[in-house]
Amino acid sequence: MARLGGDEFAVLFPACADIAAATRSAERLQASFEQPFLVGEGSFDIGACAGVALAAAAEIRTAMANADLALYAAKAAGRGATRVFQQVMRDKYDARRALEGEVQQAVDRGESVLHFQPQVCLADRRLVGAEALLRWQHPRRGLLLPSDFLTVLEAGPSAAKLGGWIIDEACRQAASWRGQGLALRIATNLFDAQLRAGSLGCVVRGALDRWDLPRTALELEVTETVALARNSALLAPLRRLHAEGVGIAFDDFGTGFASLSTLKHCPLNHLKIDRSFVSELGAAGAIGGAADRGNVAIIDAVVALGRGLGLSVTAEGVETPEQAAFVASRGCDEGQGILFGRPAPSASLPHWPG
């Protein structure tokens, strides 16, 4: 037995060549943690996860690496879980490592592009803004959506750099549209890393000044991981930008763990109701019927919160005219979704609703 570091230990069974026997041994070790540990007058309830792998004596390093992957899977499964190494674990790990390298190269090579989705005033269907959405123009796989790479990007070292480019590129495009007589508010999503970098204020002001835009031309969309932060140093740049006129929107509101008290601490102009509550309306009959009761209740609650706090409310995921009319009747100010336009290159927006 050896302590590898932190709370991780390795146990080697030299005479065990059967995966079932190895798993039983791991489970016996875990069972020893079922009783609390007494230290002085304290009682400590400690659990353990286990990862199991087999290898020949000459492959001990490989066995250790495989057991570590199995342990990672066990931890993801929850306290007390045991997982046996499978080749698919190695394949997924190798694929993620390869993707990490590709993502870094993509940022360095400038392979990122922005597509834009219209944001519409529900009262008169007037185009009032556009959300800038990241895409990766992969040299071999074509245009990739964020679901293909965003998790890796956000965990890597390039998120803040790319986030700065997104803000600048979105502002450049907004300035171009204004030159065509289309004065729109442009919205961009923030990465957590942009706040941690400590330079968000400079990046935003620099982009707006560079492209001669008013502060109100830009809206920064934050997720609950940012909104939940009670760290004054992290939220301070948002508060200063908000005071200067830059919009702050809470994206995907209603889907995570954000408490209502969050809305008191995070500087906001805008709540965006997550698309999952809107796109399902009418899926099982007339909109507003019994099947929609849960979604309608959430939409009404978010609108009421927005009104009470002086925030505008956008319904995302609007796919049909009936959904647009319904969310407007419940008090939503703006709509966004495929009814008004799918995310597309910037050239298509001046011709909306073409």
Image: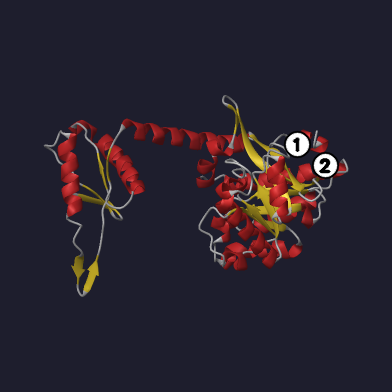
- Extreme residue in the top direction: 140
| Colouring scheme, one of rainbow, by chain, secondary structure, one colour | secondary structure
Looking at the picture, how far across and down is residue 6, in whole percent?
31, 55
Q: Name the foreground residue: 13 vs 144.
A: 144
Residue type marked 2: Trp
Looking at the picture, how far across and down is residue 50, in whole percent?
26, 46
Q: Residues within 10 Å of mark 1 (few under 14, many from 20)?
A: some
For disc 2, the marked residue is 177
Looking at the picture, how far across and down is residue 261, in whole percent?
56, 67
**Residue in the picture at 18% in, 33% down:** 57
- Up-down: is 328 above or below 351? below
Find numbered disc 2 in the image and state the secondary structure of the residue it sits on: helix
Position of residue 54 in the picture relative to residue 308 (left or right): left
- Label 2–label 1 contact, CB within 8 A: yes
**Residue in the picture at 50% in, 58% down:** 257
Residue type marked 1: Ser
Find numbered disc 1 in the image and state the secondary structure of the residue it sits on: helix
Position of residue 307 in the picture relative to residue 15 (left or right): right
Q: Using the image, tell me which numbered label, if any, was put on residue 179.
A: none
Pick the quarter of the image with the C terminus: top right
- Up-down: is 128 above or below 238? above
- Extreme residue in the bottom direction: 41
Q: Name the foreground residue: 227 vs 327.
A: 327
For disc 1, the marked residue is 346
- Up-down: is 30 above or below 17? below
**Residue in the picture at 71% in, 45% down:** 324
Q: Earlier in the sequence, mark 2 or mark 1?
A: 2
